[in-house]
Image: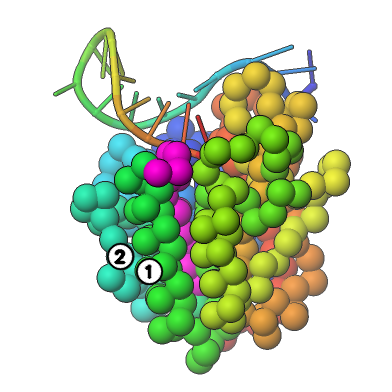
Amino acid sequence: MRLATWNVNSVTARLPRLLDWLATTKPDVVCLQEIKCSAEAFPAAAVAELGYETAAHGDGRWNGVALLSKVGLDAVTRGLVDQPGFPDPEPRAIGATCGGVRIWSVYVPNGREPGHAHYAYKLAWLTALRNTVAAELGPAPFVVAGDFNVAPTDDDVWDPAAFVGATHVTPPEREALASLREAGLVDVVPRPLKYDHPFTYWDYRAGAFPKNLGMRIDLFYADAALAATVSDAYVDRDARKGKTPSDHAPIVVDVAQSVVA
DNA sequence: ATGACTTATCCAATAAGA
């Protein structure tokens, strides 16, 4: 099976690119984040022409996540166990069982700045994610993939000095990732197609992409048994090139797991 | 060149992103 995750920064604005990328890359299951549309407005008919079923969770202007699958899409769950809000719960997590794999697409809150109420919200949200993982892990191959808005190590940002006092690199955020790993998940680190860091995000401003001023904040976490079957994992930085890209690149992961109906 | 912000929304100035 080929699994993938991509923060598309508006599925409406990105639809032509998404369709081209699906047709070329041919993933079996795709986790999308920042669809920025309601579930009803998701272009499900367009992706259905390429063979994908859709489950979307969105409410309009911001956030929003979805799952696309060619191998079945069952037991859809919208939201985490006791998911906190800001102040109300936002559409940032959707889970489903696809071809025998239990898979979650997540968009972790940004946090804005340490000390901000949004930062406390981010940490609480990650705790709810950990609790959801703990409740579900075990019976089936398991994946949580998406935009975690946390760089796991200093090696996952272009310059640690540029992030002093900023979110995405603080010990509590990194401890929240460690807690997910302690619950039984493995960080499937993709290979970069170019340069030596598997960055997944580059700011639109100041030529960050051509200068490779990036961050690895999109992550693919799998249970240990599934992670052991990974034959390839890469960041598709080519999808960040050209006119009107998302500011994030997709991660593509091939696993030996065969489709289970 | 991979190239110097982009998105949706009360349609235009703003909030949000990280």
Residue located 52% across and 56% down the image: A173
Q: Residues within 10 Å of mark 2 (few under 14, many from 20)?
A: some
Looking at the image, tell me whether mark 1 or mark 2 is earlier in sequence order: 2
Image location of residue B4, percent across then percent down: 63, 15
Is residue A239 in the magenta section? no
In the image shown, does A72 or A174 lie closer to the viewer? A174
Q: Mark 1 highlights which residue? A: A128
Is there a contact, CB below 8 Å, between mark 1 and mark 2? yes
Residue located 59% across and 26% down the image: A204
- The answer, for residue A50, to whether it is visible in the render is no
* SS of the residue under disc 1: helix
- The magenta stretch spans which residues? A103-115
Rendering quarter of residue A115: top left
Image quadrant for the N terminus of chain A?
bottom right
Q: Mark 2 highlights which residue? A: A83
- The answer, for residue A190, to whether it is visible in the render is yes
Q: Residues within 10 Å of mark 1 (few under 14, many from 20)?
A: some
Q: Distance between the Cα atoms at labels 1 and 2? A: 6 Å
Image location of residue A254, percent across then percent down: 72, 68
In the rendered view, tell whether residue A96 sits above or below residue A23.
Answer: below
- Chain containing mark 1: A
Image location of residue A88, percent across then percent down: 21, 53
Residue located 79% across and 65% down the image: A232
In the rendered view, tell whether residue A42 sits above or below residue A258.
Answer: above
* SS of the residue under disc 2: loop
Rendering quarter of residue A123: bottom left
Image location of residue A49, percent across then percent down: 49, 53
Inspect the image, locate mark 1, and give the three-letter code of the amino acid beneath it. Ala
| Main secondary structure found in the magenta portion | loop
